[in-house]
């Protein structure tokens, strides 16, 4: 059976629930693609690519160490390593000169756009569409022309939990196998987690970073100030703890989230934390903060002066 016939059979079968078949259906119903049509990924001119790289400067800087590390490990296996932005645009690629012709022929190069709408089911586009790590082995690609590729891709989230890019390990070797692809996927996922950690620590360089329990392999990160007010949370922490931007902006304490003994040994520190949190929650309105604390405005002013607190707590 030809590849295109398998695609159409999976798209039309009501009981075909494989993950790649879901992507195939998107390719047909949302993007109007035909698996037999030759569709090379759109490619930006050098000036436009430079602008895109500049827009993703923080991601590129955070990812370069991981790109180099992965290439050192997998480059000799005939793989290339690709970093994209949130649209699937390839920003950087690592590969051996001897393999460049193969990947260039497939369109896997810096400046190429690998979203599902352009080239159908593929590691980069599908991982970004489904916001999860994805391995696409050879004939699991939508387009027949891409069935020589095997791709393992993990999306990357920034310090706010928003997807900003993806990290991909691709191979065009004839002897590629599904078990090897799982190894590549595990490596891509681990590297993406490290990039996310770097982005988070850079964004909150003056804060304490707490590790929190999270679902799956990813650890959660919380950024807190000296008074235990939560300043930021990674995507894994947001999912695990059920918090969002609004929760963070409300000026809540890490101890509101985490189990265990959160009473500080120093009573003064505890009092300062409570006042700091109330002022944050009331957006610097002293009267409102006093009501939250169940005290008078005058008493709160005296405590603020004693503890060196300002109403401008942001």
Image (cartoon, rainbow, N blue to C red):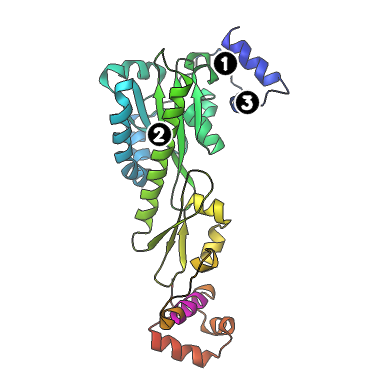
Q: Which residue is mark 1?
A: 35
**Relative to residue 125, is residue 306 depicted above or below?**
below
Q: Residue at x 62, y 13 (%)?
A: 6
Q: Is residue 253 visible?
A: no
Give the CA separation, mark 2 to mark 3: 23 Å
Magenta span: 271-279
**Relative to residue 236, is residue 281 depicted above or below?**
below
Q: x, y percentage for residue 292?
A: 58, 81
Q: Which residue is mark 2?
A: 187
The quadrant of the picture occupied by the N terminus is top right
Q: Which residue is mark 3?
A: 18
Question: In which quarter of the view is residue 110 placed?
Answer: top left
47 inside magenta stretch: no
Give the CA separation, mark 2 to mark 1: 29 Å
Q: Judging from the image, what secondary structure is the residue with disc 2 in?
A: helix
Q: Judging from the image, what secondary structure is the residue with disc 1 in?
A: loop
């Amino acid at each position: 059976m030809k590849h295109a016939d398998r695609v159409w059979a999976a798209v039309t079968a009501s009981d075909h629930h494989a993950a790649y078949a879901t992507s195939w259906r998107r390719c047909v119903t949302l993007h109007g693609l035909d698996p037999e049509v030759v569709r090379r990924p759109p490619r930006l001119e050098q000036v436009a690519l430079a602008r895109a790289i500049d827009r993703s400067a923080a991601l590129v800087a955070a990812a370069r160490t991981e790109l180099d590390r992965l290439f050192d490990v997998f480059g000799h296996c005939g793989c290339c390593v690709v970093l994209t932005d949130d649209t699937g645009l390839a920003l950087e690629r690592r590969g051996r000169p001897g393999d460049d012709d193969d990947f260039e022929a497939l369109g896997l190069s810096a400046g190429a756009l690998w979203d599902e709408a352009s080239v159908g089911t593929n590691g980069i586009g599908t991982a970004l569409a489904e916001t999860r790590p994805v391995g696409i082995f050879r004939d699991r690609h939508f387009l027949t022309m891409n069935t020589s590729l095997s791709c393992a891709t993990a999306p990357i989230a920034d310090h706010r939990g928003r997807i900003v890019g993806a990290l991909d390990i691709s191979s065009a070797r004839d002897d590629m196998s599904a078990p090897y692809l799982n190894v590549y996927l595990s490596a891509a996922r681990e590297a993406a987690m490290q990039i996310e950690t770097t982005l988070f620590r850079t964004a909150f360089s003056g804060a304490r970073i707490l590790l929190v329990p999270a679902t799956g392999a990813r650890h959660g990160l919380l950024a807190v100030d000296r008074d235990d007010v939560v300043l930021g949370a990674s995507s894994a922490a947001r999912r695990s703890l059920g918090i969002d931007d609004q929760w963070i902006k409300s000026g809540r304490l890490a101890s509101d989230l985490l189990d265990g003994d959160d009473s500080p040994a120093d009573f003064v520190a505890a009092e300062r934390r409570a006042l700091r949190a109330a002022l944050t929650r009331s957006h610097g309105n002293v009267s409102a903060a006093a009501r939250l604390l169940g005290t008078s405005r005058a008493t709160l002013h005296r405590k603020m002066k004693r503890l060196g607190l300002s109403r401008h707590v942001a």
